[in-house]
Image: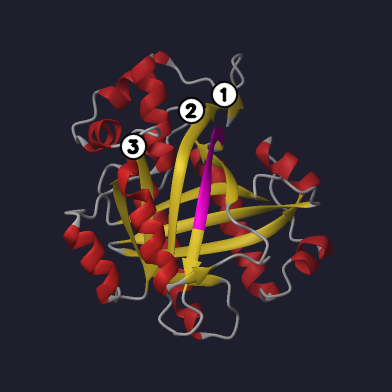
């Protein structure tokens, strides 16, 4: 890789592996670990719905009737979420997401602000979210702030004692392998912080049942582009053969819609299906990051 005068990372030559093959290799490597005692990978289905804000009260009433708030602190009413997504200077991750490839992945950081107040922390969550078909796998680690600052500048994460102590739920061997794959992805595809996406989230789950159901709804998506997006990269998004980005832009407005996400292990409850059917709400493909970058490109 080399750094351009505009501060963008570019590859000296084309990657020897594709994003899809990298994602498939990643999933094939770690899927068997789900059966182990090292709980660091969460496998689930993830359905998304765009719902008019006019149904917000009805939705919240329905969720509160059947589920319970899902936050570490009982005083939390909602979370302000801040996610920073990594991408290449030609927005390969956006294009990969809308390509309908069987295997996909994304890399992002995430910070939580309970009730809108961001607490000081010595760590940042770093997530690899991989998907094959309809099944999502998410791996998350806590990275010391200093290590994250260096990582965002292109330096690899070092699986040192501080990182190991911050993630006691993850086996050391597993942690070292995964950090190696994250570093490899950053170097291979020239990834760097691309866009910060913020929104508010309410979360619900059913701790009375062991069905893996978790329901969230997000409002007020906003974004801040962190990297210089070239005119060519922006134009290439507008010229995508697939119309997924256009559907995202036309089908969602932060002022008019909320984003409902249903995470489950293959089955959704009848009461939720009834709510969706009654209001003629259908599952859709939506990515807050892709939407944000498409919005940015459309303004260009």
> Magenta stretch: dominant SS?
strand
Q: Residue at x 24, y 68 (%)?
A: 273
Q: Earlier in the sequence, mark 3 or mark 2?
A: 2
Disc number for residue 8 = 1
Position of 54 relative to 134 (above/below): above
Element type at marker 1? loop
The x and y percentages for residue 283 are 23, 55
- What kind of element bears circle 2? loop
Asked where in the image residue 219 lies, by quadrant, the reply is: top left
Q: CA distance from mark 3 to mark 2?
A: 12 Å
Q: Quadrant of the N terminus?
A: top right
Q: What segment is highlighted magenta in the picture?
A: 193-202
Using the image as rendered, state which of residue 63 and residue 130 is in the foreground: 63
Question: In the visual, does 268 lie left or right of 115?
Answer: left
Q: Depth check: 295 or 11 in front?
A: 295
Q: Which residue is tagged 3?
A: 95
Q: Residue at x 47, y 37 (%)?
A: 220
Q: Are marks 1 and 2 in contact (CB under 8 Å)?
A: yes
Residue that mark 2 sits on: 89
Q: Which residue appears at 69% of the width and 35% of the height?
A: 153
Is residue 195 one of those drawn in magenta? yes
Q: Is residue 116 left or right of residue 213?
A: right
Residue in the foreground of this view, choosing between 32 and 116: 116
Q: Circle 3 — which element? A: helix
Q: Could you tell me residue 198's position as x and y percent?
A: 54, 39
At 38% from the left edge and 26% from the top edge, which residue is drawn?
Answer: 295
Residue nearest the observer in this picture, 13 or 194: 194
Distance between the alpha carbons at the discs numbered 1 and 2:
6 Å
Distance in Å between CA atoms under marks 1 and 3: 18 Å
Residue 91 shows in this picture: no
């Amino acid at each position: 890789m080399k750094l351009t005068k505009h501060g963008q990372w570019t590859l000296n030559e084309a990657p020897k592996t594709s994003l899809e093959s990298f994602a498939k290799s990643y999933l094939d490597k770690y899927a068997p670990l789900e059966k182990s005692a090292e709980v660091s990978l969460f496998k689930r289905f993830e359905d998304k719905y765009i719902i008019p804000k006019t149904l917000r009260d009805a939705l919240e009433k329905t969720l509160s009737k059947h589920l319970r708030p899902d936050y570490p602190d009982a005083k939390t009413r909602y979370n302000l979420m801040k996610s920073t997504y990594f991408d290449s200077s030609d927005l390969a991750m956006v294009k990969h997401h809308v390509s309908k490839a069987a295997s996909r992945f994304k890399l992002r950081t995430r910070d939580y602000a309970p009730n809108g107040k961001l607490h000081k922390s010595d760590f940042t969550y770093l997530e690899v979210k991989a998907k094959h078909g309809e099944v999502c796998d998410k791996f998350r680690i806590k990275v010391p702030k200093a290590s994250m600052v260096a990582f965002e500048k292109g330096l690899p994460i070092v699986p040192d004692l501080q990182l190991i102590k911050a993630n006691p739920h993850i086996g050391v061997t597993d942690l070292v392998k995964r950090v190696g794959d994250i570093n490899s992805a950053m170097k291979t595809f020239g990834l760097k912080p691309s866009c910060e996406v913020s929104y508010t989230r309410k979360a619900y789950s059913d701790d009375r049942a062991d069905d893996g159901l978790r329901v969230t709804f997000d409002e007020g998506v906003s974004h801040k582009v962190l990297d210089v997006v070239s005119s060519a990269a922006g134009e290439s998004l507008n010229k995508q053969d697939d119309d997924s980005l256009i559907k995202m832009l036309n089908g969602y407005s932060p002022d008019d819609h909320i984003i409902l996400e249903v995470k489950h292990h293959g089955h959704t409850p009848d009461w939720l299906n009834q709510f969706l059917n009654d209001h003629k709400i259908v599952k859709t493909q939506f990515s807050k990051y892709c939407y944000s970058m498409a919005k940015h490109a459309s303004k260009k």
